[in-house]
Image (spheres, grey):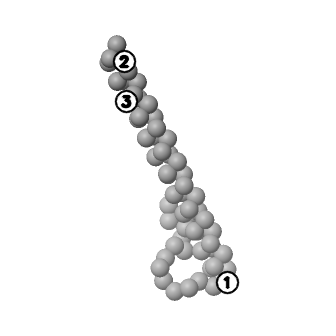
Amino acid sequence: MTDRYPYRHHGPAVHGSKLADYLISEANMTEDIEQLRAENARLRGSRLTTSRQTRAMSCC
């Protein structure tokens, strides 16, 4: 995972070509976070559907 954003740090400012690498790293991290959030939302949605289906089936 660190290969996708090797320049992620809280150190000194980055300049030149390292700046481009840093910006790519930030974009990769943002993309990864968005994908994780989407996956978590999808999983939560499927769990809610399953629990609703279970409750609906248990009442009949």
Looking at this view, name the residue that lies furthest to the top: 60
Q: Residue at x 56, y 85 (%)?
A: 13
Q: CA distance from mark 2 to mark 1?
A: 62 Å
Which of 19 and 50 lies nearest the eye of the viewer? Answer: 50
Can you see residue 3?
Answer: no
Looking at this view, name the residue that lies furthest to the left: 58
Can you see residue 21?
Answer: yes
Q: Residue at x 54, y 71 (%)?
A: 6
Q: Is residue 15 above or below residue 24?
A: below
Q: Residues within 10 Å of mark 3 (few under 14, many from 20)?
A: few
Return the mark for residue 57: 2
SS at circle 1: loop
Q: Is residue 24 above or below residue 17?
A: above
Classify residue 22 as left or right of residue 36.
right
Q: Residue at x 63, y 68 (%)?
A: 24
- Tag 1: residue type? Gly
Return the mark for residue 5: none
Classify residue 58 as left or right of residue 1.
left
Q: Residues within 10 Å of mark 2 (few under 14, many from 20)?
A: few
Q: CA distance from mark 1 to mark 3?
A: 53 Å
Rendering quarter of residue 43: top left
Q: CA distance from mark 3 to mark 2?
A: 10 Å
